[in-house]
Amino acid sequence: MVINTVGAHPVTPYSIDMREIILIAHNVRSAHNVGSLLRTAEGLGALKVYLTGYTPYPMHNGDVRLPHLAQKIHKQIKKTALDAEEFVSWEHRSEVTELFTELRANGFTIAAVEQHSGSTALPDYALPAKLALLVGREVEGIEPEILDLVDICLEIPMFGRKESFNVVQAAAMALYYARFTK
């Protein structure tokens, strides 16, 4: 199923990089996290957000979900998105692997934001002109079979005692780095 809402991204004095950035949220359970991801992606000028797998998504014209379920999920997303779902372009896809193929055909590098034995520290990565950042499940992380399909794993260095960041915090840091690093 392809859903598309059109969002306009005005150029601000802070838009120092014209890099094309896409965010993919795969199998993220929390509708509140989805709303926050949409708000963060919109604020940092992501070209588009793909909500894949079982990730909840906002209501849209032609929605085939049961109306009461779609409304409940939409209300939860809207609580943290604060209308960003209306301004950022987003699309729901059940299958993420087909999306990877399409994005690569359009010149995008697929980068998972994930702790992994073969990951590269985010600050050490030379960013491409077209970047699709993949974030995933809040507790378990991105599934190993999905990690096998990405071009690179990027890890945000941790300096405290905790082992990881929340999916929205990680996405925000990666999006900010991608937007403002030359």
Image (cartoon, rainbow, N blue to C red):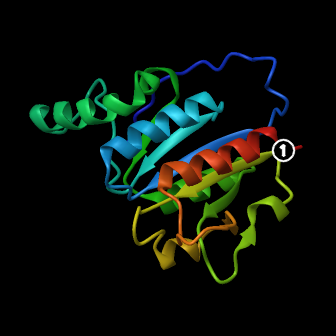
Residue 5, compared with residue 37, is above or below; it is above
Return the residue nearer the eye: 59 or 115.
115
Return the residue nearer the eye: 4 or 73.
73
Residue at the farthest right position: 182
Please tell me in which quadrant of the rendered image residue 161 appears: bottom right
Residue 80 image position (x, y, % from top left): 38, 32
Q: Which residue appears at 60% of the width and 73% of the height? A: 115
Residue at the farthest bottom position: 117
Q: Quadrant of the C terminus?
A: top right
The answer, for residue 2, to whether it is visible in the render is: no
Q: Is residue 164 left or right of residue 66?
A: right
Residue 87, compared with residue 120, is above or below; it is above
Q: In this figure, which residue is indicated by the disc labeled 1? A: 181
Residue 170, compared with residue 37, is above or below; it is below
The answer, for residue 40, to whether it is visible in the render is: yes
Q: Quadrant of the N terminus?
A: top left
Residue 121, compared with residue 30, is above or below; it is below
For the residue marked with disc 1, what is the amino acid? Thr
Return the residue nearer the eye: 176 or 102.
176
Regarding mark 1 in the picture, which secondary structure is present there? loop
Return the residue nearer the eye: 120 or 2.
120
Residue 4 image position (x, y, % from top left): 45, 30
Q: Is residue 63 left or right of residue 168?
A: left
Residue 174 image position (x, y, % from top left): 67, 51
Please tell me in which quadrant of the rendered image residue 83 appears: top left
Crowd tier of the residue under label 1, counting other residues whose Cα lies within 10 Å: few below 14, some 14–19, many 20 or above: few
Q: Which residue appears at 67% of the width and 63% of the height? A: 156
Q: Which residue appears at 40% of the width and 43% of the height? A: 34
Q: Is residue 158 left or right of residue 89?
A: right
Residue 55 image position (x, y, % from top left): 35, 51
